[in-house]
Amino acid sequence: MLQKLRSPNVYFALGSLLIFVLIQVLISMGDLNPYWQGIIFWGAAITMVSLGLNLIYGFNGQFSLGQYGFYAIGAYASADITFRWLHHDPSALVVVIVGCALALVFMGGVGVFLRRFYGVTTLAKFLFYLIATILGFYLAVRFVNPAIGPALYQMLNALPLGISQQIVFFLALVGGATLAGIVSYLFGIPVLELGSDYFGIATLGFTIIIKVLLDNTDTLLPFPEMKGARGMIGIPKWTTWPWVFFTFMAVVLVLRNILHSSTGRAILSVRENERAAELMGVDTPSNKVLAFVIGSVFAGLAGGIRAHDMAFLHPTMFGFLPSFNPLIIIVLGGLGSMTGTIITGFFWVILLEGVLRLYLPEGFETWRFVIYPLGLLVMMLLRPQGLMGKYEIPFLRRPLPPPRAHEVPQPEKVAPTAEEVTV
């Protein structure tokens, strides 16, 4: 019993609970002003994005610069759901949730269908999945939304205001993260066939495309409420510390459990030696796509949290230069280290957006693009494995399996002496 109380799981749970209670008390008593509260929330969001990128790049070995594109998808999708809901329009909620659900069902059916055939080309696979996704969202827009939208709005509005808002916020976060995952799956089918360097260039192009589309949401896309390059306003400020804490913990626990599973070992094997993994029977294309999708879902979830904390979104927040932030964080913390990513993610935001903004002269922000590359250069020269290297806190380490029956050491057999044999 005493050994169980001293286990890493118990220490981690108690430490996490202590942090949650401490910050909640500081917020409730007003000792943590809104500025530092926003810094902590932002630290959690950027760390979730970085953990997703660490899964893609640090653990799976696929160099990606597309995390901010999926971060933007999750932010804008969830913000559009809650914005329209406040304006008595449940269409975005129904279309995103039901559309994603139908798309996943149809994509699952396509996967079962394509497994009947051998040698299906990547382009054909992509077209089948794209058609399934479009069909799912078309049915949601054309038939499901008119049928259940008004009834759903009346049903949720019949609940107390606080409960209905929390339900809508939860569905908005889930919808934004799921949509980011679906887009990443469609994007990853053809692009993950490329080599790591070319894949990085393609994902950077994806981020730029998303930014251009966000600039024109009110012209090219039918979303006038997003206001294009002027920025989206009127987003409800529903992000609270419990939401931030529990979504962050969910990301950490999901990633930890994935890495400690057989799927996680397959993902790691692709990073170590893709050809050897294939020879050992690992489905490398599927594991690449899986890591890419999970990492993108984490980014989409973080986008929803961030959008409802700032209550404002602008396309420049998801542009070319900000998209390097998660990459810098995981390189500084250590590729393949969850502990390093978590520590560096929070330290990154608290130092650069908190301490330095308060105590350095105005205009320092323009120097960060000189400091970033210099810091990375020094890190690559002095400690190329990152600040934490491969170190993980005990809770995040891979647990050692219990010894099997035939592996339990047996007492050594001593050869009988001559007297014993004679007797």
Image (cartoon, helix red, strand yellow):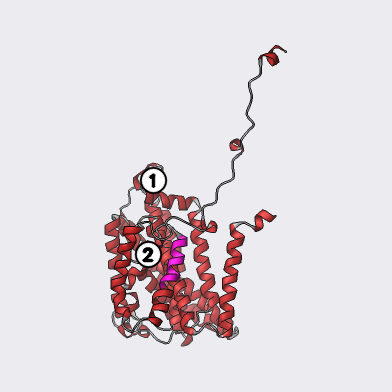
- The quarter in which the C terminus is drawn is top right
Residue tagged 1: 277
Q: Amino acid at mark 2?
A: Ser
Residue 349 x/y as whole percent: 42, 74
Q: Is residue 345 magenta?
A: yes
Identify whether 267 is placed above or below 409.
below
Residue 123 x/y as whole percent: 29, 57
Tell me which numbered mark, 2 or 1, is placed earlier along the sequence: 2
| Residue beneath the point at 54% across and 70% down | 246
| Residue beneath the point at 34% across and 61% down | 379
Q: Amino acid at mark 1?
A: Ala
Q: Is residue 142 in sight in this rendering?
A: no
| Residue beneath the point at 50% across and 84% down | 33
The residue range painted magenta reads 338-348
Secondary structure of residue under mark 2: helix
Q: Residue 184: which numbered mark, if any? A: 2
Secondary structure of residue under mark 1: helix
Q: Is residue 36 magenta?
A: no
